[in-house]
Image: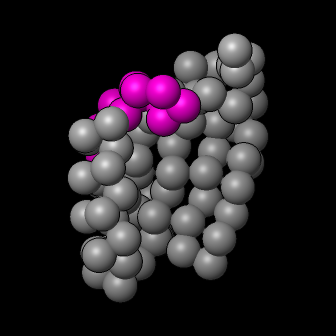
Amino acid sequence: MEEELLGRSPRTLIEVLSDKVAVKLINNIAENILEIESEYGVLSAVGGQGLVPEFHGTYLHSPKGAKKQLWFVMENIALSPII
């Protein structure tokens, strides 16, 4: 499956990496620390419940020649039917 962009904001990108996993990429980690802490807390507490995707964890990614990114890896629910 080819990477697919699901969403974009000035601070983040959300990409589908496979039929099972989507990744939210956060740039400027220091500038977004409050958002990161809040989102991590919510996903850790309720990920996989109801319509909230299952949360697999966060990873620090260092692209060659670019600033580090924080990746939130979660279940890809974009293609799942809602029942």
In the foreground, 62 or 36: 36
Quarter containing the C terminus: top right
Residue 3 shows in the view = yes
Q: How is the image coloured?
A: one colour
The answer to which quarter of the image holds residue 7 is bottom right
Q: How far from the left and from the top, in percent, is residue 79?
A: 73, 23
Q: Residue at x 64, y 36 (%)?
A: 16
Quadrant where the N terminus is found in the figure: top right
Main secondary structure along the magenta-highlighted residues: loop
Q: Is residue 34 left or right of residue 54?
A: left
Q: Position of residue 67 (x, y in %)?
A: 41, 73
The answer to whether residue 62 of the structure is visible from this angle is no
Q: Is residue 19 above or below residue 57?
A: above
Which residue is at a point 25% across and 64% down the rendered structure image? 37
Task: Specify start and end residues of the magenta stretch as a single range.
Answer: 47-58
Q: Position of residue 46 (x, y in %)?
A: 33, 36
Is 56 magenta? The answer is yes
